[in-house]
C-alpha cells in the first residue's frame, strides 16, 4: 500500500530511497521513503501489531516477535526496491521512549523488555528522590516527572553487573549492525541526561550506584551506527554495505522535525501536538527551560533534531478512545471511528470532562467504566453511551491541549501564533476543531505520517539527498503535503 505524503512525482528523478522503521506502542510499520526534488513519497511495505503482554510477572514487550516483524518489513522493502530497480541507501529506526532491554557481554537480550505501562517503577520513585532531590534532578535533566521514566525503571533492577541497557530503537539497531550506541533524542528521556551539556549526567549514575557505561556512547541524529551484519543482510536481501543511520529515534523527535511550519503560518512561533497513543504538546526552543516554575508545571525538555529542545508535556492521548473501542468490541459493539466522532460531534458542548493525564488511565482494562467513574468523582454523570464517552474524551483532550500550550507560552516567554497537529490525531476532525476552539488559535492538521517523514528526511540529509537545517527539511514537507486548517469558532 502506498501513501502520497509529499509532492513526489513519478516524472521527477529520485534522489534517494530509504527504509524507515517506525514503531509505536500499539503498532509498527516499515516504510520506503523516496526523496525527489519535488518532495517525499512514502510507501508502507509492512504493518504489524504491537502491544504489551503479561510475561514473567509483569507487562512486557514481546521484543523477539517485534524484531522478527522488523526483519520481515526490511525483507519486503528490499524486494519492492529491487523490483523498481532501486537501491536502499540506509535504514532509520524510531520508537517510543524510556523503555530499554538489557543485553549481556555476548549481546544476548537477557529478558523481554518491561513496558512503561507496568507499575513496577512506582515504588522506586521515593528511594530515587531520597538520593537525588527532584529539584536537583530537574535543574540538570529538565525532564518531566513521570513514574515510568527510565531512571525509576532502572532503580528496580536487582543485578546489572555485566549488562548494558539499550533503549528500544538502539536495541534494534544493535541487532542489525552489532554496534551499541544511544541516540541522543531518546537518551534525553531517561532522566540521566544533562539538558544543557547534551551529555550523560555522570553524577546521577554514581548517586544511584549505576555504572557510567550502563548505556553505550551517545550518537546524534544523522550519524551512522554501522553497516548491516552479514547474516542480517543475507536474511533481508539487502547489500552488506547498507547503513543504519541514527534519526530522531524518539518518535516524537522525528515527528516534530517534520512539522511543516513556514513563515506564512507563524514560522518559528508555533506550538505542536504530536497526536497518537499519547499526545506530546509543546513548543520548539533553542534552550531548555530549567526554572522551578517549569518543574512545578511538570514540563519536560527533551532533545530534538539539530540540538533543538522539545519543550513539552505528555498529555493523555487517543489511547483513551482506542481502549474504549477495544472494550466495546469485547461486548460485541464495533462502531466505526467516523460514526463515533460524528455522533459525538452532534452532542452539545459543555459536557463532563476528565483529566486525561491522570495515571489512573495508564493501564488497560475497561476504559469506558474508568472514564465514567472519573466523571462521577467530579460530581457529574456521564451516560454509558459510546457517543457521550467519545465526546468526553475529545473535549477533555482539547481542554488539556489548550491548558498545556498556554502554560508553555508563559514559562518559555514565547507566544505561538498557530498550532500544528501531526500524527494520527491530525485526521480527527472533531478533535482538531475542538482544539482550535479551546486554544483560540488556528490549527493546521497534517501530515499524518510526520514521524516517518522526519525519519526519512534525516536519513536523506545524511546521504546528501537533502540539504539544510530544519527549515529547509520542513519546506520539503510543506511544499507538497495536503494540510487542513481549522479556525476557532467564535
Image: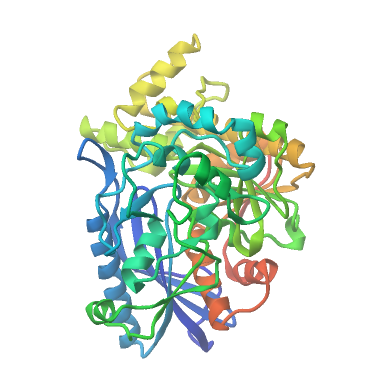
| Horizontal side, residue 200 vs residue 157: left or right | right
| Camera sees residue 489 | no
Q: Residue at x 48, y 39 (%)?
A: 208
Q: Position of residue 275 (x, y in %)?
A: 51, 46
| Horizontal side, residue 268 vs residue 157: left or right | right
Q: Nearer the viewer, residue 113 or 117?
A: 113
Q: Residue at x 35, y 63 (%)?
A: 172
Q: Nearer the viewer, residue 277 or 442?
A: 277
Question: In this picture, is 177 found above or below 403?
Answer: below
Q: Nearer the viewer, residue 66 or 3?
A: 66
Position of the C terminus by quadrant? top right
Q: Kindly indicate the quadrant of the structure image that contains residue 398.
A: top right
Question: In this picture, is 140 found above or below 134?
Answer: below
Q: Kindly indicate the quadrant of the structure image that contains residue 483.
A: bottom right
| Camera sees residue 334 | yes
Q: Position of residue 226 (x, y in %)?
A: 42, 77
Q: Residue at x 53, y 82 (%)?
A: 463
Q: Nearer the viewer, residue 255 or 138?
A: 138
Amino acid at each position: 500500500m502506498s501513501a502520497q505524503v509529499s509532492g513526489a512525482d513519478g516524472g521527477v528523478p529520485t534522489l534517494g530511497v530509504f527504509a524507515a522503521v517506525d514503531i509505536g506502542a500499539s503498532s509498527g510499520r516499515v516504510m520506503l521513503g523516496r526523496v525527489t526534488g519535488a518532495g517525499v513519497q512514502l510507501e508502507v511495505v509492512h504493518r504489524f501489531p504491537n502491544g504489551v503482554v503479561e510475561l514473567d510477572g509483569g507487562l512486557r514487550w514481546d521484543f523477539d516477535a517485534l524484531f522478527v516483524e522488523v526483519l520481515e518489513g526490511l525483507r519486503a522493502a528490499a524486494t519492492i526496491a529491487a523490483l523498481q530497480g532501486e537501491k536502499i541507501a540506509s535504514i532509520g529506526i524510531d520508537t517510543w521512549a524510556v523503555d530499554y532491554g538489557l543485553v549481556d557481554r555476548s549481546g544476548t537480550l537477557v529478558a523481554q523488555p518491561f513496558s512503561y505501562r507496568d507499575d513496577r517503577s512506582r515504588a522506586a520513585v521515593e528511594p530515587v528522590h531520597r538520593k537525588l532531590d527532584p529539584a536537583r534532578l530537574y535543574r540538570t535533566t529538565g525532564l518531566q516527572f513521570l513514574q515510568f521514566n527510565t531512571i525509576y525503571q532502572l532503580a528496580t533492577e536487582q543485578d546489572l553487573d555485566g549488562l548494558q541497557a539499550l533503549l528500544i530503537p538502539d536495541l534494534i539497531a544493535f541487532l542489525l549492525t552489532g554496534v551499541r550506541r544511544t541516540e541522543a533524542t531518546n537518551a534525553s528521556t531517561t532522566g540521566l541526561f544533562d539538558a544543557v551539556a547534551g551529555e550523560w549526567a555522570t553524577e546521577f549514575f554514581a548517586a544511584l550506584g549505576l555504572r557510567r557505561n550502563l548505556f553505550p556512547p551517545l550518537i546524534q541524529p544523522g550519524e551512522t551506527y554501522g553497516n548491516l551484519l552479514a547474516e542480517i543482510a543475507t536474511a533481508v536481501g539487502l547489500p552488506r554495505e547498507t547503513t543504519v543511520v541514527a534519526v530522531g529515534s524518539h518518535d516524537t523527535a522525528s515527528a516534530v522535525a517534520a512539522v511543516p511550519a513556514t513563515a506564512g503560518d507563524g514560522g518559528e512561533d508555533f506550538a505542536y501536538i504530536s497526536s497518537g497513543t499519547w499526545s506530546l504538546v509543546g513548543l520548539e526552543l533553542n534552550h531548555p527551560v530549567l526554572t522551578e516554575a517549569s518543574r512545578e508545571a511538570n514540563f519536560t525538555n527533551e532533545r530534538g533534531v539539530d540540538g533543538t529542545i522539545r519543550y513539552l508535556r505528555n498529555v493523555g492521548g487517543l489511547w483513551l478512545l482506542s481502549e474504549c473501542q477495544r472494550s466495546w468490541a469485547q461486548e460485541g459493539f464495533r462502531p466505526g471511528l467516523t460514526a463515533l466522532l460524528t455522533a459525538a460531534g452532534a452532542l452539545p458542548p459543555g459536557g463532563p470532562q476528565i483529566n486525561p493525564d491522570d495515571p489512573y488511565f495508564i493501564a488497560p482494562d475497561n476504559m469506558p467504566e474508568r472514564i465514567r467513574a472519573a466523571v462521577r468523582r467530579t460530581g457529574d454523570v456521564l451516560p454509558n453511551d459510546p457517543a457521550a464517552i467519545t465526546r468526553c474524551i475529545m473535549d477533555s483532550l482539547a481542554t488539556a491541549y489548550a491548558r498545556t500550550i498556554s502554560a508553555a507560552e508563559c514559562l518559555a516567554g514565547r507566544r505561538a501564533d498557530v498550532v500544528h497537529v501531526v500524527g494520527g490525531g491530525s485526521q480527527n476532525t472533531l478533535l482538531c476543531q475542538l482544539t482550535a476552539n479551546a486554544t483560540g488559535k488556528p490549527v493546521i492538521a497534517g501530515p499524518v505520517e510526520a514521524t516517518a517523514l522526519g525519519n526519512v528526511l534525516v536519513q536523506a540529509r545524511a546521504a546528501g539527498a537533502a540539504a539544510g537545517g530544519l527549515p529547509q527539511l520542513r519546506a520539503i514537507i510543506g511544499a507538497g503535503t495536503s494540510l487542513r486548517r481549522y479556525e476557532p469558532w467564535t
